[in-house]
Amino acid sequence: MAKWGDANFDDLLKLKERLGDLRKVGLEDFISGVARELAARLLAEVVPRTPVGKYPAEMGKMGGTLRRGWTGGVDRAISSYAAALPIEKQGNEYIITIENPVEYGIYVEYGHRQTPGRYVPAIGKQLVVNFVQGRFMLRKSEEFIDSFKEKYIEKKLLELLKGVF
């Protein structure tokens, strides 16, 4: 019978222990945390891009309803709002829904038609153009987040693995 040599399995046992530690860290919690951080970054991008209505002082109106709508209509920090958003798991995907409940938000995002010459008392002006272009504040913010999310997730994963190994 041939002699193959001695084998030391101590390193494999250590690797097994470390992989067990990784399981204890909680991959679900890690993924949820990264998803919430990306949601907070998306909100941090979309809120400043959202236009604020400007009204004459004599009208007594204050703009910013659409901007405040991104955080549920309350004035609180974006990070605390994002931390409270529910995460839905569908298969291998973690979904966080970010929405703005303000009724006219979709018209500001994508644009809208209007009738030129019509007087609008709320703004005190006559309409001039047929179509008002959208601002695409959410779409532009999503594209910005998409441009770096892979690198961000990879960085966070490496930090997690360094902590375990």
Image (cartoon, rainbow, N blue to C red):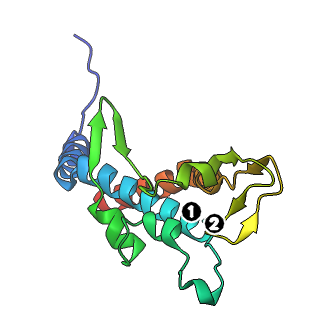
Residue 46, percent from left and from top = 56, 62
The amino acid type, in three-letter code, at marker 2 is Arg
Instruction: Compute the Cα span from label 2 to label 1.
Output: 5 Å
Frontmost residue, 161 versus 65: 65
Left or right: 119 in relation to 18: right
Left or right: 25 in relation to 112: left
Q: Which residue is mark 1?
A: 46
Looking at the rendered structure, which numbered label has been put on residue 119? none
The amino acid type, in three-letter code, at marker 1 is Val
Left or right: 54 in relation to 105: right
Seen from this angle, which residue lies furthest right?
Answer: 128
The quadrant holding residue 124 is: bottom right
Tell me if mark 2 has few (under 14), some (14-19) or many (20+) residues whose alpha carbon lies within 10 angstroms of its own.
some
In the image, residue 6 sits, relative to residue 154, either above or below, namely: above
Seen from this angle, which residue lies furthest bottom?
Answer: 57
The quadrant holding residue 156 is: bottom left
Frontmost residue, 68 versus 63: 63
Residue 34, percent from left and from top = 38, 56
Residue 159 seen in the figure = yes
Disc 2 and disc 1 in contact, CB within 8 angstroms: yes
